[in-house]
Amino acid sequence: VALAGGTGSAKLLRGLAGLPIDLTAVVNVGDDAWFYGVYVCPDIDIATYTLAGVADVRRGWGIQGDTYNALAALSRLGRDTWFRLGDLDLATCLLRTELMGNGATLTQATDRIRKALGVKSPILPATDGPVETWLLTSKGELHLQEFWVREGGKPRVNKVTYRGARGSTPTPEVKSAIRAADRVVICPANPVTSIGPMLALPGFAKLLGASRARVVALSPMVGRAPVSGPAGKLMKSTRVRPDSLGVAELYSDFLDAILISDEDPALKGPIEALEIRCALTDTMMTDLVSEARLAKELLEL
Amino acid sequence: VALAGGTGSAKLLRGLAGLPIDLTAVVNVGDDAWFYGVYVCPDIDIATYTLAGVADVRRGWGIQGDTYNALAALSRLGRDTWFRLGDLDLATCLLRTELMGNGATLTQATDRIRKALGVKSPILPATDGPVETWLLTSKGELHLQEFWVREGGKPRVNKVTYRGARGSTPTPEVKSAIRAADRVVICPANPVTSIGPMLALPGFAKLLGASRARVVALSPMVGRAPVSGPAGKLMKSTRVRPDSLGVAELYSDFLDAILISDEDPALKGPIEALEIRCALTDTMMTDLVSEARLAKELLEL
């Protein structure tokens, strides 16, 4: 079972999917939001598209070769279109919204879509509850998408909240997947906005701690900066050290081992002092080969 | 005020919009339906697109040069896509659905869209109520779109019902427009499925009868066949004569005059026996010139 957020996670999922294992992805829903009347699930979709081989991996979101005709028309109709959504991507969101409007859970809609796209591994939303990551910033309260996409990640962040998390639960599918797992891999995702919303679900961290599976993470940090995205800034704002030691501390209740960047040898000692195994490697996923290598190293760790 | 249905109506609206008058279109909503999670209003949209100069008039629906990328993607996702909806057309439906989801009435959503597209004449849905035209056919109960688009208009029709009409009313905007009008023009629309759903609204026919405006119609029939669409078949199934006399009889409670095809001179006498003025002309709208000429002839009649 791999716990996944956005782009970096999707790359590792692709590496894991190439190994002779039964992979189940458990995916963050805190980024999900309504745009243009459809329900957009960026992390679920980038995982699905990447495993289906249609993702625009270089850009980190959406579908390769997508067009923006509907969005351009919405803009001409006077709708603010700061959230980019291609025509093909829109189709995914339309189908999901329609299915959920007809009573399907997010889990059921996600399953239908990944099967239609030929993805073999189950992709499970962490919860079917309405969990949203909101930030209290210097520009007021912002949904994560507003902060990151509309505001370019610029406002100062004072606080991160997972709206709806306390009243939600991991799905039965997620619970059984984690209970049955040999390994739980925490993908190199933003610990605050991708893994944080899962850990905020009542019972989720306990589920990991109680699992017979070894829990291993690939750190998203190199030095004091993430490979991509706003992880460093958001870790600081939640008073987590913005490096791999901070990641290990955050996960220390259930983490057995962590793979960190070989640019951070000084962190190995402090991490092992937390009784977490730590290995160093080149953690950059620049191609399919490095994705496969890191997937293998993680499982071996 | 012009009462309008689909393609033929849109052409006459364009003719009327070119005259030095204040035009308000009152448009059928009985064709409206949910597809792919968005609310599709074919008659409102073809009126709006035609007056905005972007309609695919030759085809009779949608926007010129539209693409079908989202629809193709929906099809690849396993969604049945018999109802064609282009990416640009979809944007209109997305905005309408989003606005209505946020509490706007169909009247408000329609007004915002026509203004954004630069259309000067108000376009008013006949009602904000949920009126849908359903047909009892040899293939069971079908929504008009299922009958006409999916089934190609082939099943035998035994009965036409306007679901939701009895519990709906003309909007306040429609009432004041008709009360203030000098002329009410009934466009060459399907009397059963385009004008019928308006007449089924409690008070609508009375509103026309009580209006100080002269009510004039352009017949959609030439001989026993409509210029386009399933009018003939549906008139027969509702026991209306499938010709211009049938149209005049159907509207006789409020109709002052009707312009019919010059191929039907034998119908002039029987129509005038109903105390309805009748004039003959070439009723085919093949270009902007004939649209303008017919608009003028109607107002003069």
Image: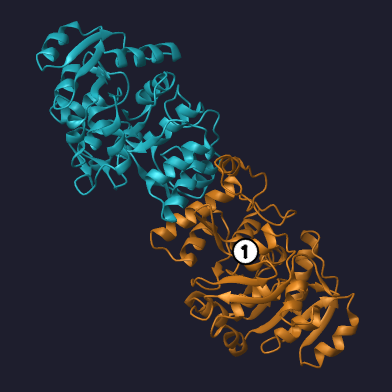
Chain colours: A cyan, B orange
Q: Quadrant of residue B248?
A: bottom right
Q: In the rendered view, tell whether residue B176 sits above or below residue A30.
A: below
Q: What is the quadrant of the C terminus of chain A in the image?
A: top left
Residue nearer the viewer, B74 or B9: B74
Determine whether A192 is above or below B2 in the image.
above
Up-down relation of residue B257 to residue B138 (above or below)? below
In this view, the residue in front, B142 or A78, is: B142
Residue B274 in picture, x, y percent from top left: 77, 92
Name the residue at 30% across, 24% down. A187
User: Quick check: A195 left or right of A109?
Assistant: left
Residue drawn at x 55%, y 66% is: B122
At 79% from the left edge and 82% from the top edge, which residue is drawn? Answer: B241
Residue in front for this viewpoint, B105 or A220 = A220
Label 1: chain letter: B
Residue under numbered circle 1 = B43
Left or right of B147? Residue A204 is left
